[in-house]
């Protein structure tokens, strides 16, 4: 398993599914038999995905899985915990709806960008087999070619340099308490916006879409903290966890996890930040986080931990509980929310009329109960809020209202039930 | 196509309210609600799934790991030192310690839950230690005391106990008597002195306390003078001691007469005359109470 995957199996629990979902809706009805063939074809091409998770004496490990993958019918919410037993041991789950092909992935297998490649392969093969169109997505892998060595590689080990100093860890961030009850059903509010108007708005501000959306999120959280903590001095930093696809920085096409997190943020204890100030701060923090030298230092810290003699020779039974107990203070506690922007997925021209929707969902956490996942396709950008709260939609509401006030039209849909609403 | 009047967002065709602010969608008369594919085909299940969260899981796993390691170490130590026959106490104590820590961290963090769980666990531990020689002895008295502690210090703080004070008082008295009976049964192997001595003495004590309690309740004045309290307490105590002496003498010697309580009674009579005077005379009472000094 790659370095960043090590933390996911031991910390998998209720409220900590460590999964995410990517899906593509087609105009045509989905045929499950054809989809199964497409999944088989993808697995033939990508042997590193045809694996199951095992618990070893010192570490969890992946080994080849000879069972057939299981296709599941679409349910009522995304990014639930994956029952490996019901999934023939696979670390990903393919779901189909009337018009939907969805891929839910356990993070130990790969990151969002890796899963997007899998989804693209499944959809393109499905479309070919279903006589919809013969297409190849840009950034996808060729199903007819043998896997490259680079696809198997763990670049974290490659970029590990023990002579570098490790990045110092930061303090804890503000966590919104929210109101009302919560449970582990993932409640979704999906905001679909026009890509062009969003792009235009970002251009006017002079920043990227990720910076713009992160700034809105930080702005909303700042307002919540202001109401929760009247004393300015006592306010905690608002920091966001924004995954960075390191493939774009180091130009390595691995199919394993190769993501680190930028943690841009503001310090509300220093005073109120205007939206322009937040934009500027977020932009600078993001730019700094993408510095390859800093990333290498982060890699040194993470891989150094894995290579520490105590970690190497401590049995899994002892490491597992420590990972579970420490993962909050070393992970979730350091940021106030997650915002993952998968970027723009270019739909091949032949499929433009067939693809009606695309979605990307994260699983929320117990500490930060609302997560944001963003994906763009065709002329739309979909911002999906995943939440554990049963009735509290304040964060989603303020975020969408800000977009509307900034001149961007938003269309919302949800899987929340009428009776769950206050 | 509907828009939320508060949020300004466009809503789904089939939406009956805005998912962000719950403002209902009001359609103009004659206009029908549209149809659109829901985001997910099935409605959300009634409740979330079961399971244990990460922190609780971590605590359980850590305690289990440490327990296994310590149990193996203890067993090996006892084995090599040739004391395997006596290994039950350290092995069992370690297991119980693990359970106690687990409960302290995982069980509901309220006074009632935590104290109940720990009283039960400590009782189980003591009973098991005592039962090593297949005969329960001292542990029954200690466990009885713990049960009594639970009734007095834990049960009385519950909502149920506060809602039914009379039944709570009856339970407290019954548990006290039960504990005295338990001591008699453990020490003598049968209820020897409990029925002929302890029960009548306790009866007088509770009856006296009950009567005076009723008397104070029926008084119009809300404040009970200290002298009255002392006076009535002494009456109850002297009567109880006299009853105890009377029944104990009868239990031991088979005759109905007072023994050591005679001298106590004579002293009590003198004291009670004085206190009776204080209680009856307002003037005297004011002289002895703090009110007099403040006047």
Image (cartoon, helix red, strand yellow):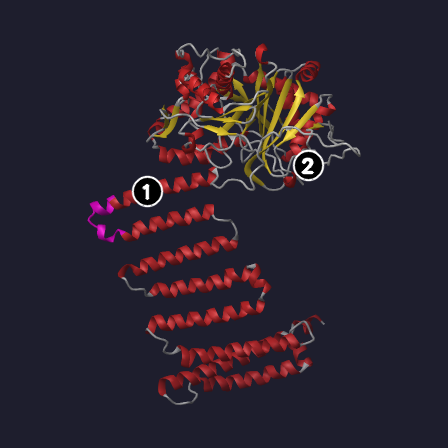
Where disc 2 sits, the SS reads helix
Q: How many marks?
A: 2
Q: Report which quarter residue A396 is drawn in.
A: top right
**Mark linked to residue A301:** none
**Mark linked to residue A227:** 2
The answer to whether residue A370 is visible is yes
Residue pointed to by mark 1 = B68
Instruction: Please identify the dominant SS of the magenta region.
Output: helix
Check the picture and name the quadrant holding the N terminus of chain B: top right
Asked if disc 1 and disc 2 are in contact, CB closer than 8 Å, the reply is: no
Which subunit holds the residue at mark 1?
B
Span of residues in magenta: B76-87
Q: Above or below — where is B96 with respect to A356?
A: below
Which subunit holds the residue at mark 2?
A
- Residue B58 position within the rendered picture, expressed as x and y whole percent measured from the top left: 43, 38
- Residue B85 is inside the magenta segment: yes
- Residue B111 position within the rendered picture, expressed as x and y whole percent measured from the top left: 52, 54
Foreground disc of the pair 1, 2: 1
Q: Do marks 1 and 2 both belong to one polypeptide chain?
A: no
Q: Above or below — where is A248 with respect to B168?
A: above
Instruction: Decide which of A172, A406 is in the foreground and name it.
Output: A406
Instruction: Decide which of B234, B73 is in the foreground and name it.
Output: B73
Q: Report which quarter residue A284 is drawn in.
A: top right
- Residue A382 is inside the magenta segment: no
Query: Is disc 1 surrounded by few (<14), some (14 to 19) or many (20+) residues within 10 Å?
Result: some
Please give left or right for residue A239 compared with residue B267 in the image. right
What separation in Å lies between label 1 and label 2 (alpha carbons)?
48 Å
Query: Is disc 2 surrounded by few (<14), some (14 to 19) or many (20+) residues within 10 Å?
Result: few
């Amino acid at each position: 398993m790659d370095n960043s995957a090590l933390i996911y199996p031991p910390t998998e629990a209720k409220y900590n599914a460590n999964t995410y979902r990517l899906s593509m809706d087609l105009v045509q009805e989905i045929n499950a038999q054809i989809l199964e063939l497409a999944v088989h074809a993808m697995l033939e091409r990508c042997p590193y995905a045809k694996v199951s998770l095992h618990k070893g004496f010192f570490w969890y490990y992946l080994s080849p899985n000879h069972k057939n993958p299981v296709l599941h019918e679409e349910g009522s919410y995304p990014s639930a915990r994956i029952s490996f037993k019901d999934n023939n041991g696979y670390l990903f789950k393919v779901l189909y709806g009337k018009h939907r092909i969805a891929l839910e992935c356990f993070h130990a297998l790969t990151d969002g960008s890796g899963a997007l490649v899998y989804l693209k392969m499944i959809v393109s093969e499905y479309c070919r087999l279903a006589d919809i169109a013969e297409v190849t997505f840009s950034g996808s892998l060729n199903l007819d070619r043998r896997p490259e060595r680079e696809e198997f590689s763990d670049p974290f080990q490659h970029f590990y340099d023990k002579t570098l100093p490790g990045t110092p860890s930061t303090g804890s961030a503000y966590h919104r308490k929210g109101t009302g009850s919560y449970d582990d059903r993932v409640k979704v509010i999906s905001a679909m916006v026009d890509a062009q108007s969003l792009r235009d708005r970002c251009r006017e501000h002079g920043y990227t879409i990720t910076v713009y959306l992160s700034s809105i999120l930080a702005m909303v959280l700042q307002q919540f903290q202001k109401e929760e903590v009247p004393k300015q001095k006592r306010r905690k930093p608002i920091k966001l966890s924004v995954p960075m696809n390191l493939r774009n920085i180091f130009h390595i096409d691995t199919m394993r996890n190769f993501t680190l997190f930028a943690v841009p943020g503001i310090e509300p204890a220093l005073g109120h930040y205007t939206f322009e100030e937040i934009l500027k701060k977020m932009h600078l923090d993001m730019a700094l986080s993408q510095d390859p030298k800093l990333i290498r230092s982060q890699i040194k810290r993470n891989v150094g931990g894995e290579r520490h003699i105590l970690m190497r020779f401590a049995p899994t039974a002892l490491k597992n509980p420590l990972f579970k107990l420490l993962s909050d203070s070393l992970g979730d506690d350091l940021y106030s929310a997650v915002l993952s922007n998968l970027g723009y997925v270019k739909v091949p021209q032949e499929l433009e009329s067939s693809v009606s929707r695309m979605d990307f969902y994260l699983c929320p956490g117990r500490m930060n109960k609302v997560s944001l996942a963003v994906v763009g396709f065709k002329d739309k950008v979909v911002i999906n809020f995943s939440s554990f709260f049963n009735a509290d939609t304040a964060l989603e509401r303020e975020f969408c209202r800000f977009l509307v006030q900034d001149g961007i039209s938003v269309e919302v849909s949800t899987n929340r039930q009428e009776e769950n609403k206050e | 196509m509907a828009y939320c009047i508060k949020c300004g967002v466009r809503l789904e065709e089939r939406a009956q309210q805005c998912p962000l602010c719950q403002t209902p969608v009001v359609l103009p008369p004659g206009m029908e609600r549209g149809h659109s594919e829901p985001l997910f085909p099935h409605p959300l299940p009634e409740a979330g799934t079961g399971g244990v969260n990460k922190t609780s899981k971590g605590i359980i796993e850590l305690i289990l790991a440490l327990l296994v390691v310590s149990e193996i170490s203890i067993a090996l130590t006892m084995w090599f030192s040739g004391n395997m026959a006596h290994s039950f106490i350290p092995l069992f104590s370690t297991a119980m310690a693990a359970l106690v820590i687990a409960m302290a961290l995982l069980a509901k963090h309220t006074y009632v839950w935590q104290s109940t769980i720990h009283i039960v666990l400590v009782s189980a531990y003591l009973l098991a230690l005592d039962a090593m020689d297949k005969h329960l002895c001292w542990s029954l008295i200690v466990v009885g005391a713990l049960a009594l502690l639970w009734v007095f210090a834990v049960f009385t703080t519950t909502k149920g106990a506060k809602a039914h004070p009379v039944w709570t008082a009856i339970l407290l008295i019954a548990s006290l008597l039960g504990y005295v009976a338990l001591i008699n049964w453990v020490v003598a192997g049968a209820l020897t002195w409990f029925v002929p001595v302890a029960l009548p003495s306790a009866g007088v004590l509770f009856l006296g306390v009950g009567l005076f309690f009723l008397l104070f309740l029926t008084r119009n004045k809300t404040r009970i003078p200290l002298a009255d309290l002392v006076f009535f307490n002494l009456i109850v105590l002297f009567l109880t001691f006299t009853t105890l002496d009377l029944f104990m003498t009868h239990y031991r010697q088979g005759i109905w007469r007072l023994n050591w309580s005679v001298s106590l009674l004579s002293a009590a009579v003198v004291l009670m005359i004085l206190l009776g005077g204080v209680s009856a005379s307002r003037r005297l009472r004011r002289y002895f109470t703090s009110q007099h000094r403040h006047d």
